Image (cartoon, rainbow, N blue to C red):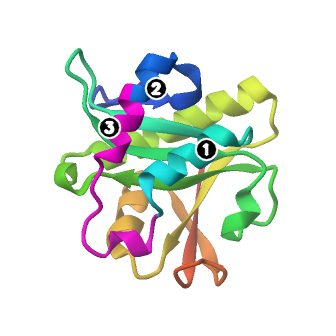
């Protein structure tokens, strides 16, 4: 479990016991997207299930820290898949995909804290798996101005345009570990 600024904890779903995983998956099922957000991100439960079934995907849950922790979001680190978002190769970066914060908890800093913690988690994953990756890449829809602003706030740099997104043109964003 990683903490960033003591406001969130990232819990890798593959590393928790079955009972805890069930509780976290139930929390994922309760996540609510803001109106219009479904165009930019998939169904949270389906994303978690896909991540658990794929050895290259590493889904995580974003929780508030402490004994009364609540699930406030989720995301997936996907190794060997950076070109899925238009990045120039699959080895130099780990793809952050399916990242979302429940709309009822947005505006509290969880997204920025979780994004920074996801970069830390990706760095640890790269070291653990002995990957050559030196950063995190993601794609954010050009119509998702709030998402772009949030990633810029977390230190990601706009690295160009990708026209292959399922919901239209994407901005490719990257942050070095």
Q: In the image, residue 129 lies at what x, y percent?
A: 78, 28
Query: Which residue carries the number 2 mark?
Result: 21
Name the residue that disc number 1 marks: 51
Q: Is residue 32 magenta?
A: yes
Instruction: Please provide percent x and percent y for residue 31.
Output: 30, 49
Say which of 99 and 48 sits in front: 48
Cα separation between marks 3 and 1: 16 Å
**Residue visible at 73% across and 27% down in the picture:** 127
The residue lying at 70 percent from left, 71 percent from top is: 86
**Nearer to me, 139 or 76:** 76
Q: Is residue 118 left or right of residue 106?
A: right
Tell me the quarter of the image containing the C terminus.
Answer: top right
Q: Are marks 3 and 2 in contact (CB under 8 Å)?
A: no
| Residue 73 coordinates in the image, percent (x, y) | 35, 45
The residue beneath circle 3 is: 27
Q: Is residue 56 left or right of residue 11?
A: right
Q: Which residues are magenta?
A: 23-41
Q: Residue 52: x percent and y percent?
A: 61, 38
**Quarter location, residue 10:** top left
> Is there a contact, CB below 8 Å, between mark 2 and mark 1?
no
Q: Quadrant of residue 33?
A: bottom left
N-terminal of the pair, mark 3 or mark 1, is 3
């Amino acid at each position: 479990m990683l903490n960033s600024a003591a406001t969130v904890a990232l819990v890798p779903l593959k590393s928790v016991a079955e009972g805890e995983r069930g509780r976290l998956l139930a929390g994922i099922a309760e996540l609510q997207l803001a109106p219009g957000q479904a165009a930019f991100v998939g169904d949270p439960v389906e994303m978690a299930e896909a991540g658990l079934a794929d050895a290259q995907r590493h889904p995580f849950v974003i929780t508030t820290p402490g004994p009364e922790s609540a699930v406030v979001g989720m995301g997936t680190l996907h190794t060997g898949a950076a070109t899925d978002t238009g990045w120039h190769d699959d080895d130099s970066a780990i793809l952050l995909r399916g990242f979302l914060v429940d709309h009822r908890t947005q505006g509290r800093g969880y997204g920025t804290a979780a994004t920074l913690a996801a970069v830390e988690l990706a760095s640890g994953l790269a070291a653990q798996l002995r990957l050559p990756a030196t950063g995190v890449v993601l794609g954010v829809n050009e119509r998702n101005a709030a998402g772009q602003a949030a990633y810029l706030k977390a230190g990601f740099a706009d690295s160009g345009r990708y026209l292959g997104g399922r919901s239209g043109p994407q901005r490719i964003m990257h942050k070095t570990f």
